[in-house]
């Protein structure tokens, strides 16, 4: 087994994973610590070391609210350890490989975690790369800066470092990806066969990296899980970039709240003090959670870049869970619904109201639709309008999720399945769930290898056919309690609303 590997900064040593055929390298530095004068700067090169560096444990997580304190579903599910090490020195990545030598050129997955750009870390138990590595994938999980330390924008930064004034968390991801390009051959990976993937804010990050033309040639395909949002009712600005001016005003308010006037003063503050004060300010609505159109890393809305063909055009897999981020028409009764529909759809209001789904009423409102589903399908149709469109594969995750909290297919529930890490979860999963997870991980591995999820599962059985989602053939892959089921789009309201996404 390949237990040591060469990197540009020195040799690293990994440990056997639970499966000794896999080697896990944890806590490899891909950039210099972003501390002191490097705070709120683009990531700088890592320093060299002598001898062999033991990479046996995850590095500290990015500065964020202490995990595992609350009783929300995410603290119960995987943010379980309030004593997990945390540090501003956080630019490290992890590698899982089943290569026996550095000459095997296996396909590579580069993973960006989610958490609204406020929370999350590569050490989350569901991100264990071992099951994918068993399928011949070299898995890399990349850490990045979060919250005010990762996404601050301020006029002083814009003046003093115009080449990299903001979007530091995204620049960390980019630096990690480029490190992989330069170094992954030493771990048996193919630097010319990389897939970038992420969920939630990680999916939004994949969108941002695809929209950055500087990344041309750095990856061959992409996976966007619950990371694109669209609404046919009120505009949904989640993950939509802000202007430098808008974001800079928030930065000025943060400096005021921190009691500093200059960037120099702010760089001298303790990271934990910034974390604490930012957490207070965020509770009042001052949240750094979107990328900024800085004219360098980000030049336009990534959704627009996808629709108009300006993104880095590679095959994409994307989708959502069934119960996450629903959009509604807020109306007190049927009469108000009619008036709201006229406001949203004008002359086509009567057509909208003719769909049975439009009359569905819940405690939150009328006509519920999934914002991630509309967002993903909208950009996929945009790609389909391009010359020689790349294949885009849509999925919806809708199995039963066990537990006495009856959670439904909540946001992030699919992560246990794609990584096939259900055994690390406390939920009472049964055989059907493990069968589904194996299928989902097989589809994912096939896509990472070739850009096409179709083929055979790990047991040599042919997987149900998964066709691309196009304007002429609205094909979906449904991940259900009975397994993967190929389907055609059934919701006629969704088809109508796709022309109205804002």
Image (cartoon, rainbow, N blue to C red):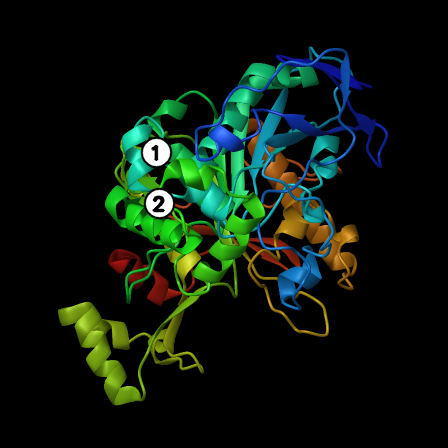
Q: Nearer the viewer, residue 17 or 359?
A: 17
Q: Residue shown at 33%/61% (left/top)?
A: 231
Q: Residue shown at 43%/40% (left/top)?
A: 265
* Quarter of the rendering occupied by the C terminus: bottom left
Name the element at disc 1: loop
Residue 413 shown left or right of residue 469 in the figure: right
Q: Where is residue 22 drawn, in percent x and y?
A: 79, 28
Q: Where is residue 162 drawn, in percent x and y?
A: 30, 28
Q: Where is residue 267 drawn, in percent x and y?
A: 46, 37
Q: Where is residue 113 drawn, in percent x and y?
A: 57, 44
Q: Residue shown at 68%/52% (left/top)?
A: 436
Q: Nearer the viewer, residue 50 or 114?
A: 50
Q: Nearer the viewer, residue 144 or 252?
A: 252
Residue annotated with mark 2 = 261
Marks 2/1: CA–CA distance: 17 Å
Other-residue count near label 1 (Cα within 10 Å), few / some / many at <14 / 14–19 / ≥20: many
Residue annotated with mark 1 = 165
Q: Residue reaching furthest left?
A: 347
């Amino acid at each position: 087994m390949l237990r040591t590997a060469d990197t540009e900064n020195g040799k690293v040593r990994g440990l056997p994973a639970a499966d000794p055929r896999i080697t896990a390298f944890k806590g490899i530095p891909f950039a210099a610590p972003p501390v002191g004068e490097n705070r709120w700067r683009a990531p700088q090169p890592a320093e060299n070391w002598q001898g062999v560096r033991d990479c046996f444990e995850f590095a500290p997580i990015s500065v964020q609210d202490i995990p595992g304190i609350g009783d929300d579903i995410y603290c119960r599910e995987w943010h379980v350890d309030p004593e997990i090490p945390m540090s501003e020195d956080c630019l490290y990545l992890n590698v899982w490989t089943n290569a026996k030598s550095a000459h095997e050129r296996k396909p590579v997955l580069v993973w960006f975690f989610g958490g609204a750009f406020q929370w999350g870390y590569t050490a989350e138990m569901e991100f264990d790369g071992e099951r994918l590595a068993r399928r011949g994938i070299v898995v890399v999980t990349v850490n990045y800066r979060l919250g005010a330390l990762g996404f601050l924008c301020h006029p002083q930064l814009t003046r003093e470092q115009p080449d990299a004034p903001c979007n530091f968390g995204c620049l960390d991801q980019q630096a990690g990806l480029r490190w992989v390009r330069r170094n992954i051959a030493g771990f048996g990976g193919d630097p010319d066969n990389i897939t970038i993937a992420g969920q939630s804010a990680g999916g939004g990050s994949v969108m941002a990296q695809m929209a950055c033309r500087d990344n041309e040639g750095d990856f061959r395909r992409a996976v966007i899980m619950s990371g694109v949002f669209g609404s046919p009712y009120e505009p949904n600005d989640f993950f939509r970039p802000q202007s430098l001016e808008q974001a800079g005003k928030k930065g000025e308010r943060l400096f005021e709240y921190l009691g500093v006037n200059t960037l120099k003063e702010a760089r001298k503050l303790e990271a934990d003090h910034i974390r604490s004060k930012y957490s207070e300010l965020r509770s009042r609505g001052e949240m750094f959670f979107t990328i900024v159109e800085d004219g360098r890393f980000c030049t336009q809305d990534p959704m627009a870049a996808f629709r108009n063909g300006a993104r880095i055009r590679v095959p994409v897999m994307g989708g959502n869970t069934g119960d996450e981020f629903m959009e509604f028409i807020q109306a007190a009764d049927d009469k108000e619904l009619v008036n709201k529909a006229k406001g949203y759809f004008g002359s086509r209001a009567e057509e909208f109201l003719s769909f049975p789904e439009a009359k569905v009423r819940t405690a939150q409102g009328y006509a519920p639709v999934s914002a991630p589903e509309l967002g993903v399908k909208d950009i996929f149709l945009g790609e389909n309008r391009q010359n020689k469109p790349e294949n885009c594969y849509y999925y919806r995750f809708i199995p039963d999720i066990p537990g006495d909290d009856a959670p439904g297919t909540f946001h992030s529930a699919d992560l246990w399945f794609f990584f096939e890490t259900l055994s690390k979860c406390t939920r009472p999963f049964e055989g059907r769930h493990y069968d589904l997870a194996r299928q989902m991980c097989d589809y994912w591995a096939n896509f990472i290898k070739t850009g096409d999820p179709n083929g055979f599962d790990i047991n040599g059985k042919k997987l149900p056919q998964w066709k691309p989602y196009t304007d002429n053939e609205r094909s979906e892959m449904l991940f259900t309690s009975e397994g993967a089921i190929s389907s055609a789009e059934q919701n006629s309201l969704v088809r109508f609303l796709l022309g109205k996404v804002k």
